[in-house]
Image (tube, rainbow, N blue to C red):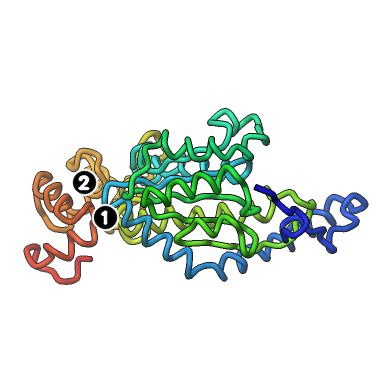
């Protein structure tokens, strides 16, 4: 697969930073800051397609499927970063949001740039993951022309998985293999061709939207609180207390008691307290509502004598 580097917007020299090596520390970071300020607008222009990706990601998770990120280099690292943060934030298993990158996990810390050209490895990655039509696969490539990533996305699409292409150039080859082609056109970099800068920032923003949006839609969030987070350290345990305190509008002592009564489960604590039911009932009602606190409160508010609970 041939790649015409010169035609890519991400590879063009940036006129604003042409004399970068002659600038003072403040001057050069000011140029970087001004260029970074354009990234959010580029992402905004892609919101309609990102919304499609979020909707289908939620559908995949509801059906027992996975959210899978595939990329190489910086793009692969962005996927691995987002996947690794989903488990503690949303209490999902490490098999729910999965990331793979060209060259394997070791390439995260030690670059293996040549791995991005391996087409067969891209296809093999999808076979190794045993991708099914229930999964959603996101191919991440700043250039939109990375052979490994394109091959992986094509293989996933052949299986029937919903595919998302995330690139930072218009008319990306990756988009041809995507059911939802997200093209965030970030333009030339301050450091010519270094897509770990604006392009990497854009990728992080979009992946944040996809994973967070999908988790909200499947009931991992109540209001704007992380009610399914893993309380794996002191900070997170205290955050859980704070969440229950604010949601229930009670004292810290009362919030701690509610959590203890709920076996340390934030969702169960909220439902037990708001609806005045035993733990077993709260657990059953949440299960019936797909784990959604809001849906549980809405469905059973009449039994609790209030239509204002949600």
Determine whether 176 is above or below 86 in the image: below
Sequence-earlier tag: 2 or 1 = 1
Q: Which mark is residue 250?
A: 1
Mark 2 or mark 1: which is in front? 2
Callout 1: SS: loop
225 vs 257: above or below: below
Q: Nearer the viewer, residue 289 or 124?
A: 124
Q: CA distance from mark 2 to mark 1?
A: 10 Å
Horizontally, residue 294 falls left or right of residue 133, namely left
Q: Residue furthest left?
A: 303
Give the percent coordinates (x, y) of residue 224.
37, 59
What residue would you read off at disc 2? Answer: 258
Q: Is residue 246 visible?
A: no
Residue at the spot 54% in from the left edge and 37% down from the top edge: 120
- Contact between marks 2 and 1 (CB within 8 A): the answer is yes
Decide: few, some or many residues near mark 2? Use Cα within 10 Å; few <14, some 14-19, many ≥20: many
Give the residue drawn at x 90%, y 53%.
23
Q: Residue placed at 88% from the left, 58% from the top?
A: 18
Quadrant hosting residue 132: top left
Position above or below: 126 against 309: above
Quadrant of the image containing the C terminus = bottom left
């Amino acid at each position: 697969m041939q790649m015409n580097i010169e035609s890519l917007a991400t590879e063009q020299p940036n006129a604003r930073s042409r004399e970068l090596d002659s600038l003072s520390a403040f001057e050069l970071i000011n140029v970087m800051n001004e260029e970074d300020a354009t990234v959010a607008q580029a992402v905004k222009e892609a919101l309609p397609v990102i919304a499609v990706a979020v909707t289908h990601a939620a559908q995949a998770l509801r059906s027992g499927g996975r959210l899978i990120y595939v990329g190489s280099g910086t793009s692969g690292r962005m996927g691995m970063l987002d996947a690794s943060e989903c488990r503690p934030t949303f209490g999902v298993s490490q098999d729910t949001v999965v990331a793979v990158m060209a060259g394997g996990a070791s390439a995260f810390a030690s670059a293996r740039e040549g791995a991005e050209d391996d087409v067969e490895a891209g296809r093999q990655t999808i076979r190794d993951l045993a991708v099914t039509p229930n999964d959603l696969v996101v191919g991440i490539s700043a250039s939109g022309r990375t052979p490994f990533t394109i091959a992986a996305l094509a293989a996933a699409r052949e299986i029937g998985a919903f595919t998302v292409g995330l690139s930072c150039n218009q008319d990306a080859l990756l988009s041809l293999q995507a059911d939802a082609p997200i093209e965030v056109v970030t333009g030339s970099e301050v450091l010519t061709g270094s897509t770990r800068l604006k392009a990497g920032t854009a990728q992080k923003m979009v992946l944040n939207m996809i994973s967070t949006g999908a988790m909200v839609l499947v009931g991992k969030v109540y209001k704007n609180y992380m009610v399914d987070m893993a309380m794996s350290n002191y900070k997170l345990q205290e955050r859980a207390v704070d969440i229950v305190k604010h949601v229930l509008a009670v004292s810290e002592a009362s919030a701690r008691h509610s959590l203890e009564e709920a076996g340390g489960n934030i969702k169960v604590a909220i439902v037990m307290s708001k609806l005045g039911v035993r733990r077993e009932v709260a657990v059953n009602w949440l299960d019936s509502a797909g784990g959604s606190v809001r849906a549980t409160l809405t469905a059973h508010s009449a039994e609790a004598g209030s239509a204002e609970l949600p």
